[in-house]
Image (spheres, rainbow, N blue to C red):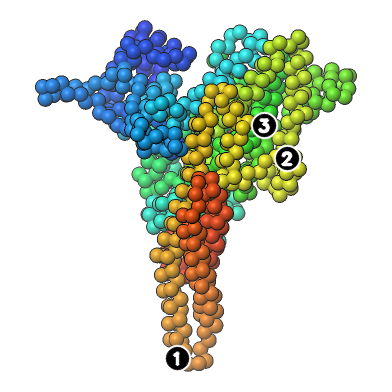
Amino acid sequence: MNHVTEIFGSMVFDDATMKEKLPRDVYKALKKTIEIGKSLDPGVANTVANAMKDWAIEKGATHFTHWFQPMTGITAEKHDSFISPTGDGRVIMEFSGKELIKGEPDASSFPSGGLRATFEARGYTAWDPTSYAFIKDGTLCIPTAFCSYTGEVLDKKTPLLRSMEAIDRHALRILRLFGDTATSRVATTVGAEQEYFLVDKALYERRKDLKTCGRTLFGAKPPKGQEMEDHYFGAIKPRVHAFMQELNEELWKLGVLAKTEHNEAAPAQHELAPIFETTNIATDHNQLTMEVMRKVAPRHGLVCLLSEKPFDGVNGSGKHNNWSLCTDTGKNLLDPGKSPYENLQFLLFLAAVIRAVDEYQDLLRVSVATAGNDNRLGGYEAPPAIVSMFIGSELEGILEAIETGAAYDPKKRVEMEVGVHVLPHFAKDTTDRNRTSPFAFTGNKFEFRMVGSSASIAEANIVLNTIVADELKQFADALEGAENFRHAVMELIRRTVREHKRILFNGNNYSEEWRREAQRRGLLNLASTAEAIPRFLDPKNIALFARHGIFSETEMRSRCEILLENYHKTVLIEALTMLDMARHDVVPAVVEYTSRLADGILKKRAVGAHIACELEENLLSRLSSLSSALDTQIRALDAAVYGAREVHGNEALALYCRERVLAAMRELRGVVDALEAGVAADAWPYPTYEELLFSE
Ligand code: ADP
Ligand code: MG
């Protein structure tokens, strides 16, 4: 066996391990639970727990934890040791089925958006047996869902699992109508390409903004940025290469299918693409990927920045959420297929996605809305805040033929049916040309490109699964009673194209014309998180999530509060960090440098009036007026931050931060960056962009 196949999944209690470690009947019972999603029999749970514990101890683990994903966006764990006293002063290592299935962590320190009264601080976690347990840092981690004691959802996994069930149910109904009796489950699959930056750790340590906020709040543009486009797919530096190698190994041990890695467009930016998996596992694995990236980087003298926009004027980082639907018989439902019948089925699924994206533009926007991602979206490097869809000209042509053919010319209808017959197999290079689209069809999957690099992909997929499930439900409702099935399908596709084609756009999403065109088409442009989040509570959205049992209205309201709170807290922390840096580092540096200049002028003058001092005088005068502006802008930002105390309620505070605080931050940054450009390199208190981006 070679090294990679040997280590791959070595820290995962995966199918092969279960088969090896569990009695046959227990293994079978567990498999069944995993496949049909039923709850586990206590007897079975005890045996599984015991086998898991023995396996974990063999691998050096001493503790176990329920590993869950609260609304903080990162994963949480509460470690318990396997140790259990025997009463005679000794201990044994124990782990019961009860402990495996259910945990009761104190929920009071996790965000609940007002859901959980403080007197009922307990929450509980429940094992998600569809995602394998694994060992990380000497601890057996059990992927779990997290709820309040009264059953309200407090995490990202529960709604994700529910949304997967919803889409399974309705996709199956459609498949049955097409005569498919072999499929018994439809799961969504996801491959999340992860972008990130690596910077030198010693330089990082000298920047408060990076340390506190994960991104730079000041920084003049370097003489060379990414203009030369020489970084993308360029040679990887040795230190980065060593990091990637170790990262891959660590991820492989955890069963994460890290596959390709390359440099990204910006200097110091990189990407990791995993092989796709079932959505909930892909989500768990993406969380692990981010965690391992952060952990491995310092071993190479590096720090991994996952923030969406670490550097102004340089491309930010996102996560491309590749999404598709797959049957348990191994068929990709977004693959056009070879026979006309498969083609028709594909077109119906395509129509469902088109209608879903158009009707729920707001939810897709909300699913990626954070303060960090606002700095990236619409920055002529990432998709704009306007949701639209790219399907390529070939497919658009076919849809057009279906739409017009039937409506206007019965003769053409024959042609249109022929069009379906000869539906081409979409090579990646004919469909993936448009890199500017927020939501692109790439041959046999959709790529949702608006997700931020630091975000969990759960939100985006909860929304995607639910909105498509809802359209499939409506299609199935309409088709199940149809007299002429084929005709009814055509009619549905035709109507969908007619009513929702405004969402299709094949042009340049970064352009100003598209902004205007999108407005003409009546598409939403929710430029910031503060405006986007409240749309979550639109009555149609509340009805949607209730219809599929994903969220209750109360749960949605709580989520909305958490997201808004997160936004204004982030902005205010950044503002305070800026003020701190400006007052304690920038002001002293500027005062010192200007007095150095003034001293120099005096010394020159002492030599004689004929010695020219224009350079120093001009510089001093420019820096002095910038210093006055600095003083003004520091006070303005301080006032804006102070003013936030008078604003009450998360929504109002979010809007206030967007309008007042961010504006004041921009002004202050402008002045500081201009000062940086005018001051001697040795006088500036922080490593520059050039050092951060181009160090070896
Ligand atoms: P592209 O060149 O379009 O980016 P790749 O084949 O390199 O396509 O895949 C990009 C990402 O999409 C990878 O993470 C891959 O695993 C994922 N992917 C491929 N097929 C699917 C699918 N059917 N469902 C979900 N993700 C997929
Ligand atoms: Mg991609």
User: Is 418 drawn above or below residue 686 in the view shown?
Assistant: above
> Which tag, 3 or 2, sits closer to the chain's start?
3
Q: Which residue is mark 3?
A: 359
User: Is the C-beta separation of discs 2 and 1 under 8 Å?
Assistant: no
Q: Nearer the viewer, mark 2 or mark 1?
A: 2
Residue beneath label 2, please? 522
Q: Position of residue 117 (x, y in %)?
A: 39, 34
Q: Nearer the viewer, residue 573 or 259?
A: 573
What is the secondary structure assignment of the residue under circle 1?
A: helix
Q: Are marks 1 and 3 in contact (CB under 8 Å)?
A: no
613 lies above or below 594: below
* Mark 3 surroundings: few (<14), some (14-19) or many (≥20) residues within 10 A: some
The amino acid type, in three-letter code, at marker 3 is: Glu
Q: Which mark is residue 401?
A: none
Q: Residue at x 60, y 23 (%)?
A: 469
Q: Element type at marker 3? A: helix
Amino acid type of disc 2?
A: Gly
Specify whether 355 is left or right of 22: right
Image spot of residue 395 (x, y percent): 73, 28
**Residue labelled with disc 1:** 607
Q: Amino acid at mark 1?
A: Val
Say which quadrant the N terminus sits in. Answer: top left
User: Within 8 Å: ligand 2 and the Cβ of disc 2?
Assistant: no
Mark-to-mark CA distance, 1 and 3:
77 Å
Q: Residue at x 64, y 33 (%)?
A: 360
Q: Position of residue 16 (x, y in %)?
A: 39, 17
Q: Is residue 247 visible?
A: no
Total marks placed: 3
Q: CA distance from mark 3 to mark 2?
A: 12 Å
